[in-house]
Amino acid sequence: MRYGFALIVALMLALTGCSTSYDPNAPMADVAEVRADEVEDWVDKVCAVMIDAGGPLRTKPAAASADLAATKTNLVTYLTKGSEALGAAVKRFDEIGDGPAPGSKRLVKDLKAAVGELKAAIDAAIGTAQSADPADPAKFAETVMKAGTDLEAAVKAADLDVKMRAEFVDAQKKAPNCQKLDSLK
C-alpha cells in the first residue's frame, strides 16, 4: 500500500504559514530568532505526527498466496493498524495546537480533514477486506482488488492541495523530524 506513504509525504508538503509571535521590547535580531525557533519547534511536531501516522502503513502486509485466509488476516491487520495510527494523528494535531504562525490553524484543520478522509477510506477498505471469502479464490482476489481500488480513489480525492508558504520552508529544513520525514520519501 504505497499510497499510504504517498499520502504522508503529500500531507507533509502541505506545511504553510508565517510567524507573528514577538516580544515588542526585545531587540529585532532576537525577535526573529525566537519566531524562527517557535515555528521550527511547531513544524517539527507536525512532522513527528506525520511520521507516526504513516508508520504502520510503511510495512506492507505479508501475502501468503497459498493461504488466502492468512493473507486476509494480514491485510485486515495492516489496514486496522493504519486506521488506528491515522486516528491517533488527528488527536495529536489537537494536542499540538494551532502553532505560532498565521495560517497554522488552517493547516492543522486541513491536515486533520485529509487524515480523517484517509482514515474513513481505510475503514471502508477494512470492511471490504473482511468480506473477502478465502474459500473462493477468484472472488477473494476481486474483493481485495476492490478494496485497493477504492482506497486509491480516496487517496486521490483527499484534499491535499494546500499551498506551501516560504516561511515554513526554512523551518522544515531545520526541524529534525521533517528531515527524518524527507528521508522516508
Image: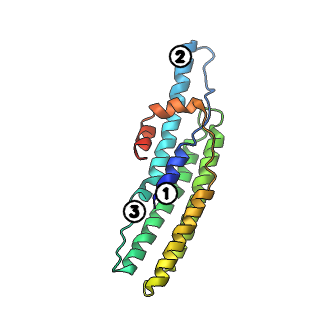
**Mark 3 element type:** loop
Give me the disc on residue 4.
Answer: 1
Instruction: Please indicate whether residue 94 sits to the left or right of residue 130 in the image.
Output: right
Label located before the other in sequence (1 or 3): 1
**Mark 2 element type:** helix
Amino acid type shown at disc 3: Lys
How far across and how far down the image is residue 78, in percent? 43, 66
Q: Is residue 64 visible?
A: yes
Give above or below for 9 relative to 149.
above
Q: Residue at x 46, y 58 (%)?
A: 2
Q: Is residue 130 visible?
A: no
**Mark 1 element type:** helix
Give me the disc on residue 68.
Answer: none
How far across and how far down the image is residue 88, in percent? 51, 55
Determine whether label 1 and label 2 are within 8 Å by CB: no
| The residue positioned farthest toward the bottom in the image shown | 135
Crowding around mark 3 (Cα neighbors within 10 Å: few <14, some 14 to 19, many 20+) is: few
Label located before the other in sequence (1 or 2): 1
Residue on which the image places disc 2: 30
Q: Residue at x 53, y 32 (%)?
A: 169
Amino acid type shown at disc 2: Asp
Give me the C-alpha separation between circle 1 and circle 2.
Answer: 40 Å
Q: Residue at x 59, y 57 (%)?
A: 156
How far across and how far down the image is residue 37, in percent? 50, 27
Amino acid type shown at disc 1: Gly
Residue on which the image places disc 3: 60
Give me the C-alpha separation between circle 2 and circle 3.
Answer: 47 Å
Q: Nearer the viewer, residue 65 or 86?
A: 65
Label located before the other in sequence (2 or 3): 2
Q: Residue at x 39, y 71 (%)?
A: 74
